[in-house]
Amino acid sequence: MTLARNFPFFSILLCLVGSVLTSVLKPKAARALTVIISGVVLVLSAFTLRYALAMDAAEPFMMGHFPAPWGNELRIGRLEALMATGISGVLFVTLLAGFYHMPAFVSDKKLGLYCIMVDLALGAILVMLYTNDLFTAYVFIEIMTIASCALVIVRQNGHTLVAATRYMIMNLLASGLVLLGISMLYGITGHLLMEPLGRSVRQIYETGQYMEPLTVVIALITAGLAIKSAMFPFHAWAPDTYAFAPPMSSAILSGLIGKAYIFLLIKFIFRVIGLDIIVASHIDSILFACGVTGMIIGSVMAISQRDIRRMVAYSSVSQIGYIYMGLGMGTEVGVAAALFQMLAHAAAKSLLFLSTNELTSVSGDRKRFHYLHGAGYRNPVAGVVFTVGAMSLVGIPFTGGFVAKLYLATAGMPLGGWVRALVLVALAVSTLLNAVYYLHTVVSIYRRAPAEIDYPPSHRVPRHAAAALLISMLMTVYLGIGSGPIMRVIESGLKMFA
Amino acid sequence: MSKRRSDWAQRPQARFLRWMREGYGALDDEIISAVAQPAAQRPDAEALEEHDRLIGTHRHEREMALDRLANYDLQRWANTRGRKALTRLYVLLALLLGASLIYFLLDTVAYMPRFGQVAVPTNNEVIARYIEKGLEETGAINIVAGMILDYRAFDTLGESTVLFVAACAVLILLRIDLDDQGQPMQQLIAEGSDDRHYEPKNDRILQGSAMVLTPIILLFGIYVLFNGHLGPGGGFSGGAILSSGLILYLNAFGFQKAGRFFTYKIFMWVSFFSLGFYGVAKAYSFYMGANGLNSGIPLGTPGAILSSGLIMPLNIAVGLVVACTMYIFYALFRKGGL
């Protein structure tokens, strides 16, 4: 099985070389190649996970002939492998289910360029999961920034361009903050790889020299990654971007790309700075407060939407709030719960965006709720899938969202006094609000359609797309039923992290 | 009495109940039935749109009227003085935020290690090995080339990919002949949105100097590319020089002549070969390194043109990507095409 330790590197390289290969192919072949790449990455990640489950400690993987403080490195651990498997799996089904309606949003000639962006986004996600080098992470943040903006602007109408411009400005600002943080960190430690960085940071913390710049570094990098992943006060770009991008792009952006940034933040917290120093700097309390506020505000905003896609987009803001609440607890259990929520949300959100598109397209592309009546009958698969996705985000048992909320609540229990109360109350209120808007939508797609509105004849969903939607629904259900082993992997992976 | 009832209908509770019960406001029911068309005649898309619009306007008017009654003063304030006040507030807040960020960052600089001193954290074993053993381990006299293309070659692969992805993103955004509407080029020219047919301007001075300068610039660019491991320069600077030569030629002789040797296809194939070569070559070297094998790439004698292993070919690959990207940026931002 020693070949398996090369698999993360193979999958990253496959994405990069595959993207340039995509550029010289015809659109149809490019599309097939993109799907194949994500499938192969899924298989490779699964093998990596199997390899990682058998090992006792995480292994560094030298990128070249030079060891840790000199050359670039990847790092293979359980958590990385688990996230890579989850994300590539979700991407694979998203591509299968979503590609067939891309022609409605993108001209045929630009489809090849779009495929390049998807490949590179996957490559950048993988690098951010596996890298052991902070500067490599920054380089791939850049790739991801450009690729994710391009995933939005590929649909060129007024709304989308405005949304993409705002997204780009926020994204670039965040990249700038991260770069500033990394260069200051290099200035006070002289390292870029995570192990030596961690040792130097520990030394700084113990001696107290350069403590002020270190605090600023923590703030800058956390703020940068929080902006990129649409944490609550920085979420303003998210709803428009998700609502006006092509649905497949929204699924990739909200479900997967945001998660990679959060994973990098977790890596930064655990491997570079150290959880105790983060707690001592109180940045986790800020994350906690933002997370809790985002959970409530995001849901309230989602209730007030009249457009189903904007509603789903706002619900992302609230779901990201759950993740930051878990991170902000400052305990390993909290972070483990946040990681599970990341997986559950990635699975449920991409499914929601895709099925929403199916539902609106059988209702004449109109997104207001009263046109969606009966959409669940006009496209039964999308109706069922949407219902399960909504149930997961509300937190109904036997779905991933329920288990994630349960873990978050359990993680909140050992915390002291009002923090525990805040966790429980926020979870309860947010769940209630989620139920209000999601169940309302589910009811409204199963209502009798008004006779006066004439709907276009519904197109047939291709078999592979319907199958992919059902598979992603099963993934959500699996996260709800088989959560035990996954949680054990997450916990043992977090132990390997430090 | 009637006033009280309308108050109740406007209350949030009542609206919430209605919303839960109906899925949409009772208002919609009323309007839909008011403007509904006979089911016998199937409306086409246009009629459907009209129908939507009608519902929309009715609804909008009704809502506006109700809103006006409910909070007339607030509305007027928000539309006149409120907007101005809020704009001013936002500007003020943005200025404050910017100023405080500048202050904090400048303040942090005061706590950073002094630049250029001996006893700074950056002067550690990492730098020492790069400087002392760089020549021996990478075979490159130019230490920077050794660092970016051998010690940290993966970062540089990422950087070249950044250029490629940026070029593709600009292609998506600006290339007019790939537009969604799929308008043919002739039509664009007729509309005047493509001004390429005014070219070339045939400026004698520009063309004369370009005739002399372009070959020299290109030659110099190639020199910088090929000597990246021996002296200052390398892929990024050499590529920039190459592309400046191409851009000068483009300006002097116009798109038609430049299009003879630089098209979209050429761009894609050159990127494909350069990045593909970089990826595959480095993959081999990474794979060997990671698994503790000897890559068997000879380092040669330092100082010779064919030395330092993969660095020279990688420099050329990076240079080609840089040149293509810069040229394509220029062409797209100027005319929206190649």
Image (cartoon, coloured by chain):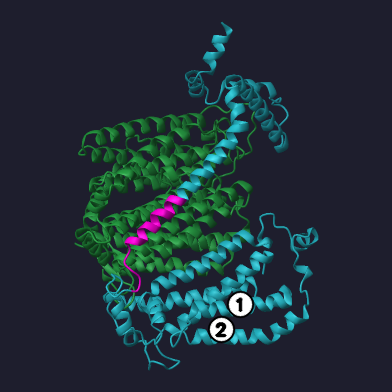
Q: Quadrant of the N terminus of chain A?
A: bottom left
Residue occupying the point 41% across, 84% down: B142
The correct choice, above or below, for B83 with respect to B337 in the image is above
Q: Which residue is mark 2?
A: B221
User: Disc 2 to disc 1, how far (Cα)?
Assistant: 9 Å
Residue segment shown in magenta: B99-116
Chain of the residue on which disc 2 is drawn: B
- The kind of secondary structure element at disc 2 is helix
Q: Residue at x 56, y 5 (%)?
A: B1
Outermost top residue: B1
Colour applied to chain A: green
Which mark, by number, is residue A282? none
Q: Main secondary structure of the magenta part?
A: helix
Amino acid, disc 1: Ser
Question: Is A26 within the magenta?
Answer: no
Residue type pointed to by label 2: Gly
**Residue located at (28% from left, 45% from top):** A337
Q: Which chain did the image draw in cyan?
A: B
**Quarter-wise, where is residue B259 in the image?**
bottom right
* Mark 2–mark 1 CB contact (< 8 Å): yes
Picture disc at residue B244:
1
Residue in the image at 41% along x and 47% along y: A472
Q: Position of residue A266 (x, y in %)?
A: 31, 53
Task: From the viewer's perspective, tell me whether residue B219 is left or right of residue A494.
Answer: right
The answer to whether residue B89 is above or below residue A182 is above
Sequence-earlier tag: 2 or 1: 2
* Residue A353 horizontal/vertical position (percent): 49, 44
Which sits in the foreground, A260 or A284?
A284
